[in-house]
Image: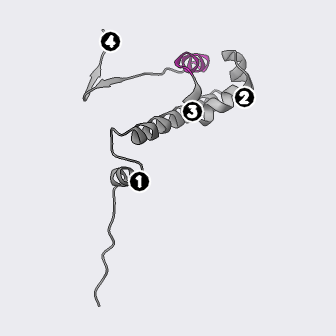
Amino acid sequence: MATKKIKTYSLAEMKDKYIGKVGTQERDEYEYELRMEVLGKMIKAARQERNLTQEELGRLVGVQKAQISKLESSANSATIDTILRVFRALKAEINFNVKIEDKFVKLA
């Protein structure tokens, strides 16, 4: 009896096929949204590590609880300034990397 071989696909192949190739607008938007979602989850994890409620963190940052809730579900609508203020209030360090053509830009 012949066994039927199942074709497998990598995550990269699936993204290329269903979202779009790297460099297309659709793929860039997807990757951006994903990064913002991860950033939101990092904020939530840091807040919970500090045993703060969303309301308490909001007070430290100077925003409403609803803004912290929205930020934790996706940092998409937040400004860099707000994100930095949140991490500062959490006494958490955040690092940004700038990459140009496979080379990271380093500040002197």
- How packed mark 2 is, by other alpha carbons closer than 10 Å (few <14, some 14-19, many 20 or more), is few
Residue 66's tag is 2
Residue at 33%, 54% (x, y): give it.
Answer: 13
* Residues tagged 3 and 4 counted as in contact (Cβ below 8 A): no
Say whether disc 4 or disc 2 marks the residue closer to the N-terminus: 2
Q: Amino acid at mark 4?
A: Leu
Compute the Cα span from label 3 to label 2.
Answer: 14 Å
- How packed mark 4 is, by other alpha carbons closer than 10 Å (few <14, some 14-19, many 20 or more), is few
Q: Secondary structure at mark 4?
A: loop
Location of mark 4 (residue): 107
Compute the Cα span from label 1 to label 3.
Answer: 25 Å
Q: Secondary structure at mark 1?
A: helix
Location of mark 1 (residue): 18
Between label 4 and label 2, give the one nearer the viewer: 2
Above or below, comparing residue 17 to residue 55 in the picture: below
In the rendered image, residue 84 lying in the magenta stretch gets the answer yes
